[in-house]
Image: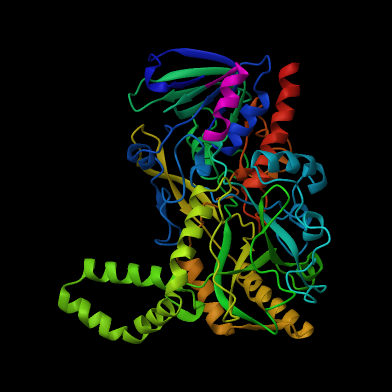
Amino acid sequence: MIHDAREVPAGKILECDLCIVGGGPAGISIARELAGSSHKVILVEAGDKKETAQARDLYRGFVEPELSHEPLEENRRRQWGGATAAWGGRCIPFDAIDFEKRDWVPHSGWPITKAQLEPYFARANQLCEAGEYKFRAEEAFPGKQREMIAGFDGPDVVSNRLERWGPPTHFGKRYARDLEAGGNITVFLNANCLQVQLDPNGTRVEQIEVASFQKNKFFIKARFFVIACGGLETARLLLASNDVMKSGIGNHTDNLGRYYMAHLFGAVATAKLKDNTKGFIYNFEKDGEGVYCRRRFWITPEAQKKNQMLNAIAFFFRPPLSHAVHRNALFSAAYLAKFFLSTFKRNSPGKAAAIFKERRADILAHLKIVMADAPGLVPQVMGIIKSRYFAKRRLPFVLPSQRNNYYYLFYQAEHAPNPDSRVVLHSEKDFFGMPRLLVKIHFTDMDVQTVLRTHQLIRNQFEATKTGELIYEQSVLLDDVKHEIGEFNSSAHQIGTTRMSADPQQGVVDPNCQVHGVDNLFVAGCSVFPTSGHANPTLTMVALAVRLADHLKKKLQK
């Protein structure tokens, strides 16, 4: 059943076998795995079914230095379903190399292998509704061309790796019925966990303190607890729960909040193919279940080691709407509409006229594109509306046509694990009196060099195979990477802060995601990742959550 925590009497004590804090993909996945069992489960979610301004304000925090990270409330969702309420649905598993100790990457290595996680990836893929667990083109599309570009692949770069896309799946909406049907799951919305309270010895959680905005403080006791609040909020809650452990729960070795990671993203280079009319798989492909898939360039493990770099991928993407090089009538029409509306809205008629005169050449270039394809614009718009808003599986995004044979290359690179990249508590308090968070994200030279070497390796591969060319200036790329770092946006890829380790001196949780030294406290989510890989974190996060659910089932049966 789903209840409203605002209706719980102040001072009430609830009891259960398992208490899950957080109603995002990790928390919901664990609850769903236990639905229908004999174990009583309570899941508390801080938000409501839709996010409110009051709830979002609790995420507000600070960054140091200024602009070095997006505002902390920008990419997070304090609501039922968590980040999946705004998720695009992209699914990619971590690679085997991401789990390995790499001697050229300080602080790398997981205490588990990808092989150990493989069965859970398959189950996670189903939860994310991304079809079969097949992430190589030759597996998903047998009989079709293996490479993105015929004859391109080599020892340093391959293009047969896939990303798969869920509908996208809003976990709160999709799995609410499953939780209710189980009969043993109780969900409380508007239930903010304010503190995790340990026993006097600091070895077990006795209860958690919860309240709604009505300030009706109540408590939940359980045999086991799981914190699944996201990469930033999980660290904040554990740091703020410092009545017994003065530096925070799990922070006995000063690792809590450290190793905060994300990914570096950007698009600077363009590719021009020798022949883009054959042997080139550019658009999304649908597998037998109708799941959208797309091929990407991946730097092989051998090349990563040889070039002393981190993991990275790249794929063809749309250029900015303002760049008429795309020669796409829909993109040009969208750009012109946005440009005219914003210019008139923000400026006086005289100032607007001056801006139009200054941008005359740009405006004419876009108008020419629109007029050249005006008859086809309406059907194109209708097709996109249908595939984006009325289909069961949403088209992930619209790509420009292949007519001009120029393709923007979007890169996504691993962020090196770094203890100096961290989150700490700030002196300012929120509505409930909890300290807000201060983010101090850091990047290293290896992060920068990885992006540069990724482009160089792809350029080399085009030249070696004579399949095309990658066009960019090294200095422009370097400036862009530095700009991305200076005004960084995580795009909701908030990783690390409660890293997994076999040695309690090196992390916060053990290989089973149990907080070191606390017998009945576990963490679920990408905060436990020791490294970030190149992949969007959701699929790996859900795989770890399902694995944790299996572990908890065994613990609960004892």
Tell me which corner region of the image, top left, top right, bottom left or bottom right, holds residue 252.
Answer: top right
Lateral position of residue 437 relative to residue 264, left or right = left
Of residues 519 and 365, the one nearer the viewer is 365
Of residues 293 and 226, the one nearer the viewer is 293
Q: Eyeballing the image, is 129 above or below 186? A: below
Check the image and name the residue furthest to the front: 375
The residue lying at 34 percent from left, 67 percent from top is 338
Percent across and percent down for residue 206 are: 56, 19
Percent across and percent down for residue 424 are: 48, 46
Tell me which corner region of the image, top left, top right, bottom left or bottom right, holds residue 499.
Answer: top right
The residue lying at 33 percent from left, 68 percent from top is 337
Percent across and percent down for residue 361 are: 35, 87
Query: What kind of colouring is applied to the model shown?
Result: rainbow
Total numbered badges shown on the rendered structure: 0
Q: Eyeballing the image, is 117 above or below 481? A: above
- 174 in magenta: yes
Percent across and percent down for residue 412 are: 61, 64
Of residues 184 and 104, the one nearer the viewer is 184
Residue 8 visible in image: yes
Lateral position of residue 251 relative to residue 503, left or right = left
- 52 in magenta: no
Task: State the predominant SS element of the stretch in magenta.
Answer: helix
Q: Which residues are magenta?
A: 173-186
Q: Eyeballing the image, is 384 above or below 61? A: below
Lateral position of residue 52 relative to residue 462, left or right = left
Q: Eyeballing the image, is 281 above or below 422? A: below
Residue 197 visible in image: no
Q: Quadrant where the C terminus lies?
A: top right
